Amino acid sequence: MSGRVRIIGAGLAGSEAAWQCALRGLEVELYEMRPIRQTPAHQTGNFAELVCSNSLKSDSENTAPWLLKEEMERAGSLLIEIARECAVPAGHALAVDRIGFAARVTETISRESRIVVRREEVAALDENNGVTIIATGPLTSEALAGEIGRLATARPAREEAQAPHHLYFYDSISPIVEADSIEMSHVYLAARYDKGSADYINCPMTQEEYGRFYDALRSAESVEQRDWENLNYFEGCLPIEEIARRGRDTLRFGPMKPVGLKDPRTGKMPYAVVQLRQENLRADSYNLVGFQNHLKFGDQARVLRLIPGLENARFLRYGQIHRNTYINAPALLWETLQLKAHPRIFIAGQICGVEGYVESIATGLMAAIHAAAHVTNCEPIPPPRASALGSLIHYITHADPKNFQPANITFDLLPPLEHNIRDRKERHRMQCERALRDCDRWIESIHSVSTRAQDFSA
């Protein structure tokens, strides 16, 4: 077996996987169909393009998203390193200039001598032709999705026959407005509970203003559903019109939650609030946090301009919806992200059943580590169960295959402590301490595998 790996897809997971494989001395063929063939959501041909939010979530110490990023940094994640270099102000969150981030990842990957970039669509898979990492993301082309389905149907007979081999849900994109079209006299800067710096623009609403907005939203027309009669949304990324259908106050307890956002001009908490987060380092555009939607563009403009501060907003991008494909990981994958029926094929990124940017990067990192072990005839070592990396993989490979849905990293996925700690902050701190301790040991154990991979390739 040669020290070569084929990676399909240069999104977040594929880019991280390509770098990690090259770092371990393997020769990499990285396939990316963009810009030759675009997807419904991407706008460029750059690697690691972020299509929804520009946030990599909380960077506050001892939170679950922070823990996952901390473990990845200790394991040498390239994309987390670049994300920090391309960070924009976002309070206690890590958010990036999405254009600068994708450009930096593309440049870094493209100049690595061990990585050959092939700008072409892969429509067929040969499970017997070396090691392949499939990291095509939730917008996998129909042809390749069919190939993945073909391999998935060949799962071992002992697996649950009733579990579908691939699934899908619908995801949405938040609108982006030009900064100089925001009426700053109607808004204020603040971070929730004053955590981090006051980097978010907050658009406060009175009860009357919220009522007008809600009624307009409920009467707005959605884009024609076509063959999407039974939309299967990911609960963590519901369109605002879908949230609004669940009750008049659901938005006020969701993306328009005012808690912790006291208006410094009045000293009071508004009835509802819409937050805007900086899009890039130039601060010339902002996205509406949690305002993904599936409304017709004309109705979007009419409804969103009812938000104080956005009366004359110019939209650089309207909200959209797109179909996301993912496999039924509990039925199909080992904890090493290998297909049970085809161990030379690894699955990484959102298509393997994780949700979120950082989670996708994490699976790319782990798939590369395990692929390098496989290529060099070493036994792949999954990350420890107590770590964020291990808990994320444990969930997607051990959940109920009949009711599987993608997941973000949360403390609910981590195993409980041996002794119950009532104080939540202290409990989370101790879980993080245990996770990092175990993760450090794992990183040391896989270092020898990396060294062997480099020797093997040499």
Image (cartoon, helix red, strand yellow):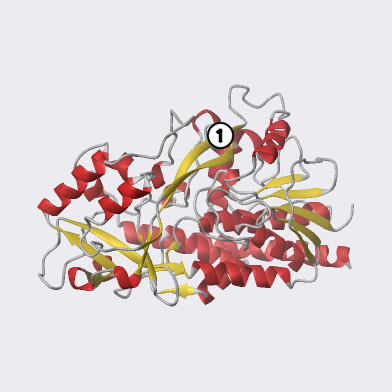
Front residue (pair 396, 240): 240
Q: Amino acid at mark 1?
A: Leu
Q: Quadrant of residue 159?
A: top right
Q: Quadrant of residue 16?
A: bottom right
Please state the horizontal and vertical placement of residue 316, each as a whole percent of the image: 41, 62
Front residue (pair 321, 364): 321
Q: Residue furthest front?
A: 298
- The residue shown at (85%, 41%) is 128
Q: Is residue 444 left or right of residue 436?
A: right
Q: Quadrant of residue 141?
A: top right
Relative to 201, does residue 238 appear above or below in the rendering? Answer: above
How many residues crowd mark 1 within 10 Å: few (<14), some (14–19), many (20+)? some
Q: Is residue 197 left or right of residue 249?
A: right
Please state the horizontal and vertical placement of residue 145, each as a whole percent of the image: 66, 38
**Residue 437 seen anywhere in this rendered image of the structure:** yes
**Residue 76 seen anywhere in this rendered image of the structure:** no
Front residue (pair 391, 227): 227
Q: Is residue 172 left or right of residue 106?
A: left
- The residue shown at (43%, 48%) is 320
How many numbered marks does the figure carry?
1
Please state the horizontal and vertical placement of residue 268, each as a whole percent of the image: 11, 65
Residue pointed to by mark 1: 167
In the picture, the quarter occupied by the C terminus is bottom right
Front residue (pair 252, 406): 252
- The residue shown at (23%, 63%) is 203
